[in-house]
Image (tube, rainbow, N blue to C red):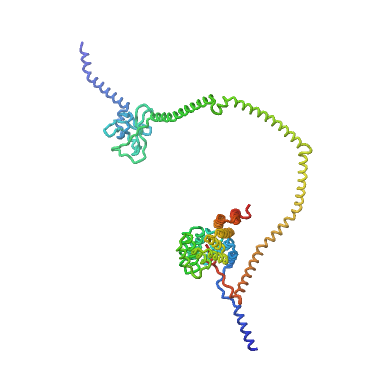
């Protein structure tokens, strides 16, 4: 009986300890928190345009609050959502504006350099993107440095710079994304199986844009014409569905051109027509 | 008997002296009347006018010097030296205040093209002249005959090309008429070719036939209009339209009956929508409370280990190329 009382007392103490809440921090702006939360939810649900709207409102609220940290966070989130929505020019403008605003307060935020480098890469300005990414490779944040090295690897591959690609691959830290590592390995080795592995990893991470790029890479590397055409068709359809019409047109045209299969050619033609005339338009 | 004659001879010298004095007196009176003496005693100033290298246009000693249209002096002499020609003029001192360093003397003719030359001095506004050695420049008035000659040249330059063009146009017209006369070109063929004339006649005949057919068509149109105006034509159509309008009128009447209830419906809708913002605010507050509750629940044992703090910023990994 005495033992039972001791056990009950211990359980009560544990329950009381568990019920204690964390020490309260500084009071949060509920509007800012709600907008950020709404933006995060929209971003996670693959609605980057809606997320951008929420993040823009959060940025305005942060400016009302005159909170440099909140401005930086909302600005980064807005630029990332604009990139995800396929608006690299808007993302570049946002990053530049917030960077200047923070610089006036004596704050340097390297995350915005990653936004600028990625936006420039998306717009095809490879030299400027490489220069922006080069400034991030020495960053003490491994996530930033790995992202910069991956971007530089992609640019080196597009320039045909094999040593540069190998250097970028070797510079990735162990914490780098396995999908990034696999894609750079595929580009360096020319192995289509590695590219397909990278596509699988991208799919698991819900990075469908990267997956389409890896599929197109596998199509480029594979020797079988029919398989390459199939991969190009898959990559093109995925890109078209995400609104990346430029890459979609390129890859679907490749599929149409090299495929020996009339059915696949017809599918590619149909997908190209759907890009030019989206459903709902008369 | 010769004694009286000797007396007359004795008074001759006095009479002659008296006569000389009278003559001198008359001479002085005439000179005063002619104004010569006033000229002698009138104060004057000397002015040198450097004449233009193109010539003096007949300016000579004795020529008038005018200032603002008023004669103020005379040219005393025209001096020609190897370097320049200048005139020396004598002016009234009254003209000093008007003649400055920037004054110009213009050599003019009395009647424009002809007449005696004179100097016309313009009124100056600059620094005053040093009247101990006053010098100004003169210019000549442009010769009107030069302007006339230039105008005639311009007219010649304009007129002769027009005359040349007119000559060429007349020549081309003559060629064209000659070609028409010889039967060249469409008009020439039309004039000379009899077959073409026959075709034109045929066309006129066809036109007449077409006109007759058009008249027949118009008659048919008249008949059609008359048929439409008949009791089975347009009036029947109008009756149907009248019936349709009556139906519409009935529908409108029903709508008018329902209209009095519209304000009440609108009021209800307005009341409902007026409550919407408050309802939304309450919903928002409830959601916020629910979110706080969930957040506290997440931080409550045994769920606290699974709830991490909400990151204020997206991960850089979300920024993908």
Q: Position of residue B22 (x, y in %)?
A: 27, 22
Q: What residue occupies the far top of the structure in this picture?
A: B1
Please determine whether, in this image, residue B68 is positioned above or below residue A60.
above
A35 or B33, which lies in front?
Answer: A35
Q: Above or below — where is B189 with respect to B286?
A: above
The quadrant holding residue A273 is: bottom right
**Rendered location of residue A130, percent (x, y):** 47, 61
Name the residue at the right extreme: B231
Residue closer to the observer: A186 or B182: A186
Asked whether the viewer can see residue A242, the reply is: no
Image quarter of the N terminus of chain A: bottom right
Horizontal and vertical percent position of residue A35: 58, 65
As drawn, which residue projects farthest toward the bottom? A2
- Tally the numbered discs: 0
Q: Residue B291's image quarter? A: bottom right
Q: Is residue B9 above or below residue B201?
A: above
Q: Residue at coordinates 67% horizontally, 28% vertically from top-left?
A: B208
| Between A51 and B75, the one nearer to me in the picture | A51
Query: What residue lies at 35% left-to-right and 27% top-to-bottom?
Result: B116
Asked whether residue B125 is in view, the answer is yes
- Residue B87: x, y in percent? 30, 32
Would you say A139 lies left or right of B238 here? left
Q: Indicate left or right for B92 with B217 as reference.
A: left
């Amino acid at each position: 009986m005495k033992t039972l009382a001791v056990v009950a007392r211990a359980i009560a103490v544990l329950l009381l300890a568990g019920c204690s809440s964390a020490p309260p921090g500084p009071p949060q702006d509920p509007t800012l928190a709600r907008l950020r939360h709404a933006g995060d939810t929209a971003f996670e649900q693959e609605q980057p345009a809606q997320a951008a709207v929420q993040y823009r409102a959060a940025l305005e609220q942060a400016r009302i609050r005159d909170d440099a940290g909140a401005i930086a966070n909302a600005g980064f989130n807005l630029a990332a959502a604009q990139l995800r929505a396929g608006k690299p020019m808007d993302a570049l403008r946002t990053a530049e504006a917030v960077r200047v605003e923070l610089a006036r307060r004596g704050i340097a935020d390297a995350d915005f350099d990653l936004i600028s480098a990625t936006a420039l890469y998306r717009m095809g300005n490879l030299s400027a993107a490489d220069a922006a990414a080069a400034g991030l490779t020495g960053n003490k944040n491994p996530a930033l440095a790995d992202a910069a090295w991956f971007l530089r690897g992609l640019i080196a591959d597009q320039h045909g710079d094999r040593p540069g690609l190998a250097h970028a691959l070797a510079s990735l830290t162990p914490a780098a994304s396995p999908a990034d590592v696999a894609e750079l390995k595929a580009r360096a080795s020319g192995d289509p199986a590695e590219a397909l592995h990278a596509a699988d990893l991208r799919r698991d991470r819900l990075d469908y844009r990267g997956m389409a790029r890896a599929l197109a890479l596998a199509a480029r590397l594979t020797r079988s014409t029919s398989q390459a055409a199939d991969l190009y068709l898959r990559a093109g359809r995925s890109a078209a569905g995400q609104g990346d019409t430029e890459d979609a047109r390129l890859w679907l045209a490749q599929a149409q051109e090299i495929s020996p299969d009339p059915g696949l050619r017809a599918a590619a033609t149909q997908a190209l027509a759907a890009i030019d005339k989206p459903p709902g338009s008369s | 008997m010769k004694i009286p004659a000797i007396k007359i001879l004795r008074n001759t010298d006095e009479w002659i002296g008296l006569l000389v004095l009278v003559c001198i007196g008359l001479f002085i009176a005439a000179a005063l009347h002619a104004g010569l003496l006033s000229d002698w005693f009138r104060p004057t100033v000397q002015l040198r006018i450097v004449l233009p290298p193109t010539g003096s246009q007949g300016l000579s000693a004795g020529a008038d010097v005018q200032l603002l249209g008023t004669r103020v002096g005379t040219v005393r002499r025209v001096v020609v030296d190897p370097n320049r020609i200048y005139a020396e003029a004598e002016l009234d001192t009254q003209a000093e205040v008007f003649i400055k360093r920037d004054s110009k003397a213009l050599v003019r003719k009395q009647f424009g093209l002809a007449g005696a030359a004179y100097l016309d001095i313009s009124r100056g506004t600059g620094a005053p002249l040093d009247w101990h050695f006053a010098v100004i420049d003169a210019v000549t008035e442009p010769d009107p005959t030069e302007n006339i000659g230039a105008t005639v040249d311009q007219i010649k330059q304009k007129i002769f090309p027009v005359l040349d063009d007119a000559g060429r146009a007349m020549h081309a017209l003559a060629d064209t008429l000659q070609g028409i006369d010889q039967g060249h070109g469409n008009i020439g063929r039309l004039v000379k070719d009899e077959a073409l004339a026959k075709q034109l006649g045929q066309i006129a005949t066809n036109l007449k036939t077409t006109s007759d057919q058009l008249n027949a068509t118009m008659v048919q149109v008249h008949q059609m209009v008359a048929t439409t105006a008949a009791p089975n034509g347009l009036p029947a159509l109008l009756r149907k339209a009248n019936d349709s309008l009556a139906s519409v009128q009935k529908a409108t009447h029903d709508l008018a009956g329902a209209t009095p209830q519209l304000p009440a419906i609108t009021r209800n809708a307005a009341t409902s929508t007026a409550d919407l913002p408050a309802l939304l605010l309450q919903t928002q507050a409830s959601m916020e409370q629910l979110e706080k509750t969930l957040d506290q629940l997440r931080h409550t044992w045994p769920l606290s280990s699974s709830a991490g703090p909400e990151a204020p910023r997206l991960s850089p990994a979300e920024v993908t190329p």
